[in-house]
Amino acid sequence: MNEILLTGHLSRSVSLLSLEDRLSLRKYLSLLKENPLSGLRLWGAYSGLYAYETSMGLQIIYKIVDGTVYVVAIKRAGRHAPIGEKKVSAVVLAAGKSKDQDIPRIIEITEAFSNSSIDEIILVLGYRAEAVKERLKGENIRVIVNQNYEGVLSRSLRCGLRVVAEGASAVFLALGNQNPLNPAVIKNLLEVYRMEGAPIVAPSYKGKRLHPVIFDRALLPELLKVKGNVGGRAVLYRHEGELREVRIR
């Protein structure tokens, strides 16, 4: 006989559904338990996952491991993110003098996050902060100015992380001078994190790891201790075995 388990935060999320929805969901979970392969196999970034559609407008996302069905997400039809979704903040580090000619790039990166389902955008500025702030007037972005920005990236990292919303489950770390950022890539990484719950989710292209990187909130204390002219690289290497790499095209 197969076993079915709700992973992570899902038990609490399901408890918030109406009684009618909970009873219906229980029926579908029983059906899924009897026939785990009745769902549709998801490919690409979600290799190993299945999606089971219910008549009540819910989609059950699950994986099968040694005869056990692990439900990793429950989504409502028409919603991109799962019920009880984890909130994610973005911290963009753009304080250094090297950004002198890159104000358009900084704007482009913040726009990419604005066009995805990010819950909060924090932009850390330093050099020419007023010029960047002028370009961002009216945008829903929290700007933090690091007055002591020269030569040490970790100071800007701490400035941004210290103001991350209390309810955020994870943080996207991005650089203000990185390559152009596609909102579709951000959404892809977000969905992988929300569905699989890996402590670190990073994009890669042709075997090379890229930015931005998602760090679970549990790693924030380690990130806050980073010293020198590095961002989250040291923490990422320390948790290499827990990294979920997402290949992009």
Image (cartoon, helix red, strand yellow):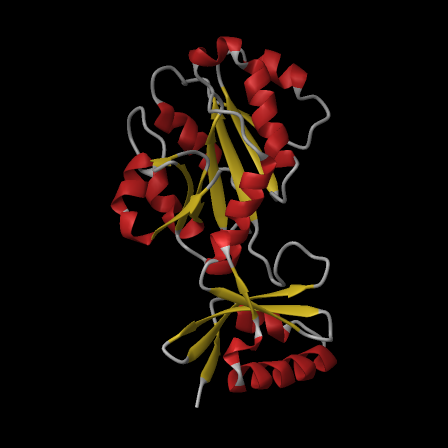
Snapshot quadrant of residue 210:
top left
Residue lying at the far top in this picture: please name it: 101
Residue 227 vs residue 61, the one in the foreground: 61
Left or right of 35, for residue 80: right
Q: Quadrant of the N terminus?
A: bottom left
In the rendered image of this protein, does residue 184 appear above or below residue 47? above
In the rendered image of this protein, does residue 234 appear above or below residue 1? above
- Name the residue located 27 percent from the left edge and 42 percent from the top edge: 237
- Name the residue located 35 percent from the left edge and 40 percent from the top edge: 223
In the rendered picture of this protein, how many numbered marks are placed on residues? 0
- Is residue 234 in view from this perspective? yes
Left or right of 237, for residue 29: right
Residue 113 in the image: state x and y as whole percent: 60, 35
- Name the residue located 60 percent from the left edge and 37 percent from the top edge: 183
- Is residue 142 in view from this perspective? no
Residue 16 vs residue 238, the one in the foreground: 238
Residue 41 in the image: state x and y as whole percent: 53, 65
Residue lying at the far bottom in this picture: please name it: 1
Residue 141 in the image: state x and y as whole percent: 63, 31
Residue 130 in the image: state x and y as whole percent: 59, 13
In the rendered image of this protein, does residue 2 appear above or below residue 217? below
Left or right of 242, for residue 6: right
